[in-house]
Amino acid sequence: MTQWERFLETFFNAEVLARYAPSILHGVWVTIELSLLIVVVGIGVGTALACVRALRRPWLTAPIVVFADVFRALPPLVLILIAFFGLPNAGVFLSAFLVLFLVLTLVLAAFAEEIVWAGITSVPKGQWEAARSTGLTFGQTLGSVVLPQAIRLAIPPLTNRAIAITKMTALGTVIGVPDILNQATTAQSFSGNASPLMLAAVAYLLLFLPLVILSRWLETRFAWRRA
Amino acid sequence: MLTIRGLRKSFGGTEVLSGIDLDVAERELVFVLGPSGSGKSTLLRCLNRLEEPEAGEIRLAGDAVTGAGVDLNGLRRRIGMVFQAFNLYPHLSARRNVTLALRKVLRLSRAEADARAEAALARVGLADKAESYPGTLSGGQQQRVAIARALALEPQVMLFDEPTSALDPELVGDVLEVMREMKRAGMTMLVVSHEMGFAREAADRVIFMDRGRIVEEGAPEAVFGAPKEARTRAFLARVGGAR
């Protein structure tokens, strides 16, 4: 067997690939499902928190800032392990899927809050004043004037962050969430062959490469000149 | 139309308005001038409470603007404001800039709001720019859209905070022309500006402010032609307003 054949045998074994493709495909669905949930809820919660912070009430701002700083500072894996292996000792039993969803959603919410808040603060004060001077309420001004401008500024960094965090669904493998990586590592240990891991890598590329390209496009698309 | 009594405002210990008393009659155009830092803009911004006055009373057509429990948003739509920096919403077309408050504050239907916006834009000479975004308009056009945005709410008084100061000289005329037309149509106006020529021809009364007080007031001919106060004379000499 030549070196080249050994390489193909190890990483691209057709028989192994065919055998484990269905289970990895199942993992793809789990990853997609989780990612969509995390992105929708995480960005939603983060945006809501940034809006609450726009009220500029210190007793509301303080807990939001603490939440955002803590969840941006802690490695998600630490949070996942604490929630999955620690909480049962306190009588709280969460499924692996729920733990992964909650932790990554909160981490994304923390980043999204900071990004959207930065967008809100970068909208000139005159926008608030013009809107309020026509009789619009705080909420109407935020919703119709400030947030649309803030979100536009936030979209490129938000997309990058969403990709970075949904990729972390692979961390679920350590607590047994049947995502792409988990299915692949299981297949790898059964078959004693690295081909399932290559298949997983290809699956991740197919999932995330379009998103990375989309984020690049968004960056140029929204590099708009401010009026 | 507008009654101001004992209005006071400080920023961090510095008193910017030291007791302003002023009445603006219906259909009157009052022109406010004074050196930078004299409190002119703050006076305007207190009138719709973009700045919260510390003391004093403001009434619009008899209704209290100051005090607890007033319907501030209801009052604000009766007080139009035009800003030095235009402050158009950059993500909305000229039409949507005008219709936003019509829809959200007056709760007009889309059709009614559109009709009113078109009328307001036509009045400022920009009927053909309804679908344009602020970024594609000149400064003068942007300011006229901003005027249309305020006008469409049919306010009882219009406040102008240095409306032409951010404009290139050749674009000032269009904005002043719109203001002249509003004056002719009977709008009550309070104008902070350095356009002395406009003050001479259009103002009913000129007010000179310095260090948070009204130092002198009178008809334009009187204030520009024969200012009584030394501070007014010094200011007019500096800005070239004296004839």
Image (tube, coloured by chain):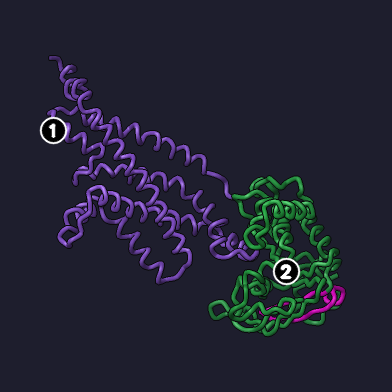
Chain colours: A purple, B green
Residue linked to disc 1: A189
User: Residue A15 magenta-drawn?
Assistant: no
Relative to B231, does residue B120 appear above or below in the rendering?
above
On the question of residue B141 being in view, the answer is no
Give the percent coordinates (x, y) of residue B84.
67, 61
On the rendered image, what quadrant is the C terminus of chain B found in?
bottom right
Residue A140 falls in image quadrant: bottom right
* Whether residue A99 is situated above or below residue A136 in the rendered picture: above
Q: Amino acid at mark 2?
A: Val
Screen quadrant of the N terminus of chain B: bottom right
The chain that hosts pointer 2 is B
Q: In the visual, does B129 lie left or right of A207?
A: right
Relative vertical location of residue B36 with respect to residue B151 in this rendering, above or below = below
Residue B192 image offset from top left, x and y in percent = 73, 69
Out of B61 and B113, give the one closest to the viewer.
B113
Q: Label 1: chain?
A: A
Q: Residue type at mark 1?
A: Ser
> Gap in Å between the C-alphas at discs 1 and 2?
79 Å
Q: Within the magenta stretch, is there residue B219?
A: yes
Q: Which residue is mark 2?
A: B192
Q: Residue at x 83, y 62 (%)?
A: B180
Q: Which mark is residue B150?
A: none
Please report the bounds of the magenta region as a residue range: B205-224
Secondary structure beneath label 1: helix
Q: Position of residue B109 (x, y in %)?
A: 67, 55
Left or right: A227 in relation to A5: right
Apparent side of residue B48 relative to residue A8 in the rendered image (left or right)? right
Mark 1 vs mark 2: give the one in front: 1
Observer-nearest of B3 and B139: B3
A15 relative to A47, above or below: above
Looking at this rendering, what residue extends furthest in the top direction?
A: A1
Specify the quadrant of the image occupied by residue B220. bottom right
